[in-house]
Image (tube, rainbow, N blue to C red):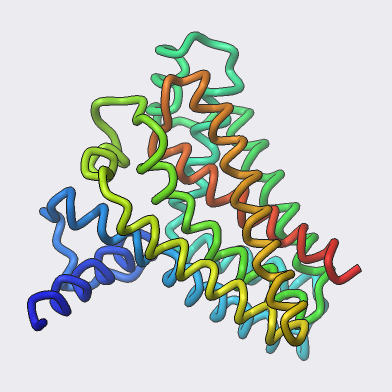
Amino acid sequence: MHDALAARARHLALAVTFLTAVRLPDAGAAAAPADLWASMGFYPLIGLLLGLSAWGVYAVLLYAVTPLVAAALVVVALELASRALHLDGLMDTADGYLSGASRERALEIMKDSRVGAMGVFAAIAVIVVKVCALASLARPGAALGLVVGLSAARLLPALDVRFFAYARREGTGAAFAGAGTTNGPVVAAAGLAATAALVTGALAHGGAGGALLGLALAGAAVTAALGVQALVGRRLGGLTGDVYGLGIELAEALALVGAVVIVR
């Protein structure tokens, strides 16, 4: 029992360290691939905590500034909290995939640390959509968009690793992909994301109807982002860590837009 709890604590620490700017002592750089894969089961929990924190900040800021300013500050803070890891993946994927180059050349472009015009455009577009959508939401709607969206978006990496080939032999996601042969982390991540969506929906919009709205929002955001990732993967012969980041950014933006649709 003690060993099992210690392993889960380590996996949670790995999730926190990888997804946020927080560095925990129990998450060393020499983690085994199996531990990295298991840590993905906790990713939606990290998204839930980020979403709750972001919603709390937004709810307080609305007393002091306009919704647009509050939304901009929250979106910027969230990118800083994740070290812009997912945004970087979005930019690299846009540069490579939209370059029109061959598969091999597109992967080279994605690996290049320099950012091109399409990467800059993709980042600006996603940030503008997030800010405008969040600014359109009062506190209950913002809870749906932020809490449900950030939690559900972090289900995607486990799905990506388990069900898509990895396009490179090396890379940020290679260590995860090599161990993604079991269903445990996928089931755990899906359960956490679904629970967060149901509870947040029920609290934000009341009762079973609100719970189902939350679950539908999470499902729609994840499904749409998976569809885009599948298109990218078809061209590249699989996904990469950058494409994982693309999926998270898209799912977050889509959840905020979906929340606007729901409340209107």
Image quadrant occupied by the C terminus: bottom right
User: Which residue corresponds to the image point at 77% horizontal and 90% vertical from the top-left?
Assistant: 63
Residue in the foreground of this view, choosing between 132 and 226: 226
The residue furthest top is 102
Residue 235 percent location from the top left of the image:
52, 18
- Quadrant of the rendered image containing residue 212: bottom right
Residue 186 percent location from the top left of the image:
38, 55
User: Which residue corresponds to the image point at 39% horizontal and 51% vertical from the top-left?
Assistant: 158
The residue furthest right is 264
Residue 106 percent location from the top left of the image:
47, 18
- In the displayed structure, would residue 145 be above or below residue 84? below
Residue 115 percent location from the top left of the image:
51, 32
Image quadrant occupied by the N terminus: bottom left
- Quadrant of the rendered image containing residue 114: top left
Residue in the foreground of this view, choosing between 56 and 3: 3
In-image side of 12 versus 46 (left or right)? left
User: Which residue corresponds to the image point at 54% horizontal and 35% vertical from the top-left?
Assistant: 229
